[in-house]
């Protein structure tokens, strides 16, 4: 059984992230699929058929040389686009809530000593915390996301000068850690949204007891390593359909128009199915990042665990 509330150095944060899946992976993904599987399938289905139709119309207008063909198609089907857009947005938001919070609730139960976690247990956690999930969602959308976009946007704009690249490389993992720590602390403690947000920021630079060195570089470094691993793996899967597509468009005529719509027929379905599969894989792989963030959070909250243990000892003394 893995110990969660303990100090981990940089190497342990990486190795324990993979050790976690070695110990709990089968049960973890079983519950993950049962909770999130249907949402993932619906999203991929919309992606395959909805976006395929959209790209077919875009390339169809290019083939026929009618510059206003796509605009006319969009105006004629505006209602369908709105309905599909709303459904896609709702599905995406629901899926992201489950995708982000599932590891939070799962690790919380493991940290409390449970070993055989069932789907119903996690479902109860979602149901019991519905109000807090709603508040978290509002906070993330209207407070955290705009601030994160501004910070990352400024860093991205500064890429015109060399310092911008290094600034973005420095800030992006920190933003990811702050958001993940916020979710872990919000549901592992009794803190409010702003209190958890404050802790998630402070914990990147110092431990709660203020007696140890700053954990900044090991948190930053662990996140960078995991992001690189995920990027390499997902790139392999996304490059496969891209290679097929590039081979297909070699049939372009000299004037730049496609002789045949590359998204038509079985080839078009195959391309988007492959992209759909790569999207599914990226969602599954993202759990490595969330678990890594969870281990970092428990590394930072050893003071919280010690406080719980002291309260339990005091309770035993009173009962005796």
Image (spheres, rainbow, N blue to C red):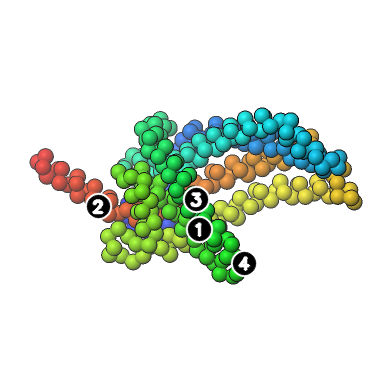
> Measured from the top left, where is residue 145 in percent x and y?
49, 49
Toward the viewer: 210 or 93? Answer: 93
The tag earlier along the polypeptide, 3 or 1, is 3
Judge depth for marks 2 and 1 and give the one in front.
1
Circle 4: element type: helix
Judge depth for marks 3 and 2 and give the one in front.
3
Circle 3: element type: helix
| Tag 4 residue | 160
Q: Left or right: 151 with respect to 162? A: left
The tag earlier along the polypeptide, 4 or 2, is 4
- The reply to whether callout 4 and callout 1 are in contact (CB within 8 Å) is no
| Tag 1 residue | 151
The residue lying at 38 percent from left, 51 percent from top is 197
| Separation (CA) of disc 4 from disc 1 | 16 Å
| Tag 2 residue | 306
- The reply to whether callout 4 and callout 3 are in contact (CB within 8 Å) is no
| Tag 3 residue | 146
- Would you place residue 56 above or below residue 172 in this image? above
């Amino acid at each position: 059984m893995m110990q969660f509330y303990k100090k981990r150095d940089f190497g342990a944060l990486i190795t324990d992230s993979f050790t976690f899946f070695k110990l709990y992976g089968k049960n973890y993904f079983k519950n993950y699929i049962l909770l999130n599987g249907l949402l993932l399938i619906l999203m991929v289905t919309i992606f395959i058929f909805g976006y395929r139709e959209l790209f077919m119309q875009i390339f169809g207008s290019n083939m026929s040389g009618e510059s206003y063909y796509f605009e006319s198609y969009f105006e004629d089907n505006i209602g369908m686009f709105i309905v599909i857009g709303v459904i896609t947005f709702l599905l995406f938001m629901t899926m992201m809530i489950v995708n982000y919070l599932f590891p939070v609730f799962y690790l919380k139960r493991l940290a409390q000593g449970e070993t055989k976690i069932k789907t119903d247990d996690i479902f109860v956690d979602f149901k019991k915390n519905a109000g807090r999930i709603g508040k978290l969602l509002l906070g993330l959308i209207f407070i955290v996301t705009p601030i994160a976009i501004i910070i990352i946007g400024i860093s991205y704009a500064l890429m015109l000068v060399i310092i911008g690249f290094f600034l973005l490389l420095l800030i992006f993992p920190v933003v990811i850690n702050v958001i993940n720590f916020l979710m872990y602390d919000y549901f592992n403690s009794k803190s409010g949204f702003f209190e958890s947000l404050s802790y998630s920021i402070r914990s990147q630079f110092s431990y709660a007891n203020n007696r140890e060195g700053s954990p900044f570089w090991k948190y930053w470094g662990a996140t960078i390593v995991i992001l690189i691993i995920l990027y390499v793996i997902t790139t392999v899967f996304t490059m496969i359909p891209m290679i097929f597509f590039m081979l297909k468009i070699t049939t372009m005529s000299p004037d730049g128009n496609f002789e045949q719509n590359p998204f038509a027929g079985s080839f078009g379905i195959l391309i988007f199915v492959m992209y759909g599969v790569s999207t599914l894989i990226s969602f599954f792989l993202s759990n490595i990042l969330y678990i890594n963030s969870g281990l970092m959070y428990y590394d930072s909250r050893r003071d919280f665990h010690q406080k719980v243990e002291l309260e339990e000892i005091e309770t035993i003394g009173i009962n005796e």
